[in-house]
Image (spheres, helix red, strand yellow):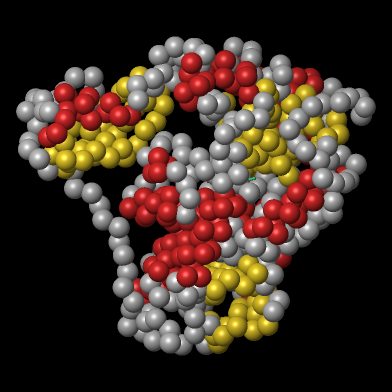
Amino acid sequence: MLLRITNLRRPVEEIEAELPGTVARLLGLQEPDLHGLKIVRRSLDARQRDQLQFVYTLLVSLREPPRTAAFPPGGILVEAFSPAAFEDALPGPIPMRHRPVVAGSGPAGLLAGYFLALRGYRPLILERGQPVRERVQAVRRFEAGGDHDPENNYLFGEGGAGCFSDGKLTCRITGPDVDWVLERFVDCGGRASLIYENRPHLGSNKLPMICRNFRRRIELLGGEYRFGCRLEGLRVQDGQLTGVATSSGLIQTSHCVLATGHSARDTYQMLLDTGLPLQPRAFQMGLRIEQPQEIVNQRKYGRDEYLQILGAADYSLVARGQRDLFSFCMCAGGIIIPSISEPEMFCSNGMSNSRHDTPYANSGLVVTLEPSEFGSDHPLAGVFLQRQYESLAFRLAGGNYLAPVQRARDFLAGRTPHPADRIATSYQRGTAARNLHGVLPPAVLAVFQRGLPVIDEQWRGQYLPDAVLVGPEMRGSSPVRIDRDRQTRQVPGMAGVYPAGEGAGYAGGIVTAAVDGLRAARQIVAGFAIPD
Ligand SMILES: Cc1cc2nc3c(=O)[nH]c(=O)nc-3n(C[C@H](O)[C@H](O)[C@H](O)COP(=O)(O)OP(=O)(O)OC[C@H]3O[C@@H](n4cnc5c(N)ncnc54)[C@H](O)[C@@H]3O)c2cc1C
């Protein structure tokens, strides 16, 4: 029989090998009576700084029923469990003449491509940038002061934004599709505990290898990558996709998963010109904040040994109000990076390696902007706003992709720093001390002025004194949504066009984008036969 045990609390110092013994005692059994034990979720309860606990959800299979009362002590819940199965798809009946195309090799495109390849559809994956190896070199050249490469940067190239992301695999959805995606990340090089950790983290250093492993598997299954190949148009006849125009010529296909992410602004324009139904969508805007990691560790851990066991501490904060100011994409032991896909723009973001080993902690601090605030009259109004503030920030810092920075306490006091002021941050290309009020719309600035002191108070005055702000931060979510049919996942009136992932406006992060790509691919497989 299969049982689910929820809310089992153990001290973080206790090693996981002790779990079977603990569970057997809880159920009045001997350890050999347990047929299997799987950790489904492990989260950290850090409310008592000197008594940190892991809170486990476990699946336990037993050779015989438990011998204890149904309600064990300590709020632990034990219940019979039958897991939801992964919904697979077998090739459908409608003939497909040409191979399906996947535009974009970020998490959405990768998982769409992988599922299609697994089921025998030999997808063509179009990627405007280069393979991850060349892409990494382009990014390194930029960090050392080189030119911005519009096709190979932190957002474009093999693996998409996901490859240069921080690699946190947290998401708000659960279920068999999420589990399937996480298992594929493990197959391709992620560590096994990703599947159950509450805040699983791949780390930016591991992502290039994982993207390469996905590619190798897709190619072994007959899929094909075309790098340096930009989707530039959709050919639609009588409401059916017949081909895609690319920078390397026309490709005949009746099925295309559009997984081009939310930074391909030229692609959005092309889709709009082609007649796709694009809508403006609420997105987050703000600044990134950085302080010494040591301060975060001290705040979260009441005992030194916790740092050895748990590594650099993270946080999640919110200043509630008429409009919330909240932390987003916190990178413990990380660095600040530029999140730009167009020349002469600046926008911040963050990443960290799996070891979380820099002396800096950084996090986005953002406010949600609604379409009614930035212009719901144009589908790309959010993109225009992003461009306006990114360009402003680039010029404010004097060009050359320096990051405009300001000490948090100067920001709050409205004090313009002296341009010669040297403010140390983890941003590698260099910084310029500036007044950041101008890189935020007035409504967002007002939320910061009210919310920052509230967050500082939550930290008993330790959050702001050593903190530096940089920005703007605007690439956390898509400012555009592409309408699609809920069931078929295709654009109404354009059979064969499957918008997926973050750029389509249906995902916000690696896992949700990957799940969305998987679901688009599953829809194709379920409806159509394998092409010859
Ligand atoms: C610095 C940073 C850190 C992040 N950290 C995290 C994190 O820790 N956890 C998390 O969950 N999320 C994180 N994210 C967000 C996450 O990376 C995205 O949600 C995710 O990558 C979206 O996946 P996607 O496949 O929809 O799009 P993308 O990853 O953006 O991929 C789109 C791909 O399409 C390609 N492309 C674009 N236009 C075309 C075209 N016309 N033709 C062909 N190819 C095209 C691009 O080159 C790119 O490879 C981070 C993002 C950034 C920028």
Q: Nearer the viewer, residue 126 or 244?
A: 126
The N terminus appears in which quarter of the rendering? top left
Res 101 seen here = yes
Q: Is residue 257 left or right of residue 448?
A: left
Task: Name the residue located 79 percent from the left edge and 21 percent from the top edge.
Answer: 410
- Residue 161 in picture, x, y percent from top left: 62, 53
Res 279 seen here = no
Q: Is residue 58 left or right of residue 223?
A: left
- Residue 171 in picture, x, y percent from top left: 45, 44
- Residue 88 in picture, x, y percent from top left: 31, 65
Is residue 13 depicted above or below 509 in this figure? above
Is residue 500 depicted above or below 39 in this figure? below
Q: Nearer the viewer, residue 20 or 260?
A: 20
Task: Name the residue located 59 percent from the left edge and 32 percent from the top edge.
Answer: 356
Quadrant holding ligand 1? bottom right
Q: Nearer the viewer, residue 83 or 370?
A: 83
Task: Name the residue located 37 percent from the left edge and 33 percent from the top edge.
Answer: 42
Q: Nearer the viewer, residue 53 or 519?
A: 53
- Residue 295 in picture, x, y percent from top left: 62, 18
Is residue 178 depicted above or below 322 in this figure? below
Quarter of the image where one finds residue 450: top right
Q: Is residue 316 left or right of residue 378?
A: left
Task: Name the residue located 70 percent from the left edge and 37 percent from the top edge.
Answer: 336
